[in-house]
């Protein structure tokens, strides 16, 4: 398969479009043929080696690395222990966030924990579905998680 990978930390110029091994499905996972991937700040934080974090907080990253947590695509394979998904289902999700795993979305295929995926609504395309997970979580956290503690939000609710 083809993937966007990097072999060292750095600027966008370290990104390479190259051949990579197709991920294997492990227990609890689904293999997704990626139709679209979202681009988010954690992708460039990873690419830059989490330079803004204190050295003791920086996670270990095995090279070559594939960035990208937000994906939308079509289920190709389902592990034997997974329920709720079948090959051909259109799905989207935020894969392995906030941790960094060995399989991410800037690739033709991604293996993902089934718990990180949802069926894609038929009313949106893959590009829009891939743009939802992290931006949607961020909006929810600020509007719902934090918003109820703000006086102006309480006035809006009444």
Image (tube, grey):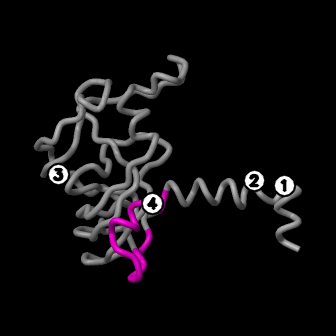
Task: Residue 65 in the image: state x and y as whole percent.
Answer: 28, 36
Real-space Cα separation, disc 4 to disc 2, in angstroms: 23 Å
* Quadrant in the rendering for residue 121: bottom left
Nearer to us of marks 1 and 4 is: 1
Are the residues flagged by discs 2 and 1 in contact, CB closer than 8 Å?
yes
Task: Residue 105 in the image: state x and y as whole percent.
Answer: 31, 52
Q: Disc 4 designates what residue?
A: 116
Real-space Cα separation, disc 3 to disc 1, in angstroms: 46 Å
Q: Quick one: label 2 or label 3, which is nearer the N terminus? A: 3
Lateral position of residue 6 relative to residue 38, left or right: left
* Quadrant in the rendering for residue 6: top left
Nearer to us of marks 4 and 2 is: 2
Lateral position of residue 33 relative to residue 131, left or right: left
Q: Quick one: label 3 or label 1, which is nearer the N terminus? A: 3
Are the residues flagged by discs 4 and 2 in contact, CB closer than 8 Å?
no
Q: In the rendered structure, which segment of residues is drawn in magenta?
A: 118-133
Q: Disc 3 designates what residue?
A: 22
Residue 149 image label = 1
* In the depicted structure, whether residue 65 falls above or below residue 115: above
Residue at image x 42%, y 65%? Answer: 117
Is residue 93 shown in magenta? no
Is residue 119 shown in magenta? yes
């Amino acid at each position: 398969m083809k993937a966007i990978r990097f072999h060292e930390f750095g600027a966008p110029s370290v990104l390479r479009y190259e051949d990579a091994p197709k991920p294997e499905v492990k227990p609890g996972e689904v293999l997704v043929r990626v139709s679209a991937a979202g681009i988010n700040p954690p992708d460039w934080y990873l690419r830059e080696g989490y330079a803004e974090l204190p050295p003791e907080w920086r996670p270990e990253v095995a090279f070559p690395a594939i960035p990208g947590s937000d994906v939308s695509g079509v289920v190709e394979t389902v592990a034997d222990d997974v329920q709720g998904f079948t090959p051909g289902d259109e799905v989207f999700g935020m894969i392995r966030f906030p941790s960094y795993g060995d399989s991410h979305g800037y690739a033709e295929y991604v293996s993902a924990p089934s718990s990180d995926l949802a069926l894609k609504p038929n009313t949106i395309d893959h590009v829009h579905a891939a743009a939802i997970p992290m931006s949607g979580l961020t909006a929810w956290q600020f509007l719902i998680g934090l918003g109820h503690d703000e006086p102006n939000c309480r006035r809006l609710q009444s």
